[in-house]
Image: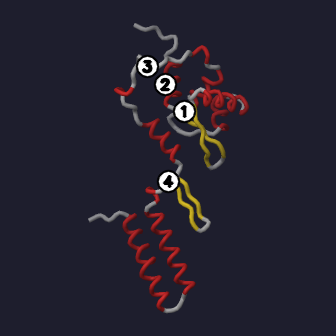
Amino acid sequence: MKIESNKVLEMVSAFVLLGVSIYFGYNSKPAEMGLTIAAGFLGLVFANLDKFKSFKAAGVEAQLREEQIKAVLEKEIESPTDLFDETESQVPNVSLVPDNAKSVLESLQSHEYTWRYVSGISKETSLTRVQVKESLQWLSEHGYAKKSLGKNGEIWASTQEGRYLYAVICFDGVPVA
């Protein structure tokens, strides 16, 4: 019988929250009682962290990066083909996409990363940071890229439309049989 680590953490936290705090309360130790209540509460929060979008209590604030997780899933999971209607979709005009934006979009398609920093894109594309930022801004304004906040500042990922544009760019000029 395999017990999940979250369940064990929940049980221990509940025991600390209820049992140990009642013991300290019975022995007239309010400081210790308060600390065990806080420890038990935090244990329960961390055991159920996947169920929270954001959490803020006692000076501690945590928020899950939902948009970052969603971007990873969008990139790794193929979209259902029955939801894609070719008659309604517009094929982007590749000639309107600036060359620098094409290079940046290609860099965003790297299989090694879902989210990219400007510095990494700059190294990979041999463009300056200013050129990369301008290209990312253009891609973002047209719905081909999106940004979020990472540990070291802004991070960027391509959207589903951006991945489609990249595919169109790759096959631009290829004769249709």
Q: Secondary structure at mark 1?
A: strand
Q: Is residue 162 left or right of residue 10?
A: right
> Between disc 3 and disc 4, whose residue precedes?
4
Q: Secondary structure at mark 4?
A: loop
Residue in the image at 64% along x and 31% along y:
136
Camera-side mark, 1 or 4:
4
> Between disc 3 and disc 2, whose residue precedes?
3
Q: CA distance from mark 3 to mark 1?
A: 21 Å
> Between disc 1 and disc 4, whose residue precedes?
4
Which residue is labeled 4 in the image? 53
Which residue is labeled 3 in the image? 88
> Between disc 4 and disc 2, whose residue precedes?
4
Residue in the image at 61% along x and 19% along y:
97
For label 1, count other residues whose C-alpha is less than 10 Å away and answer few (under 14), some (14-19) or many (20+): many
1 and 4 marks in contact (CB < 8 Å): no
Q: CA distance from mark 3 to mark 4?
A: 35 Å
Say what amino acid the circle numbered 4 marks: Lys
Residue in the image at 59% along x and 68% along y:
58
Percent position of residue 111, x then y: 50, 35
Say what amino acid the circle numbered 3 marks: Glu
Which residue is labeled 1 in the image? 158
Which residue is labeled 2 in the image? 164
Residue 154's image quarter?
Answer: top right
Camera-side mark, 3 or 2:
3
In the picture shown, does residue 86 fall above or below 158? above
In the picture shown, does residue 167 fall above or below 40? above
Q: Secondary structure at mark 3?
A: loop
3 and 4 marks in contact (CB < 8 Å): no
4 and 2 marks in contact (CB < 8 Å): no
Residue in the image at 47% along x and 73% along y:
40
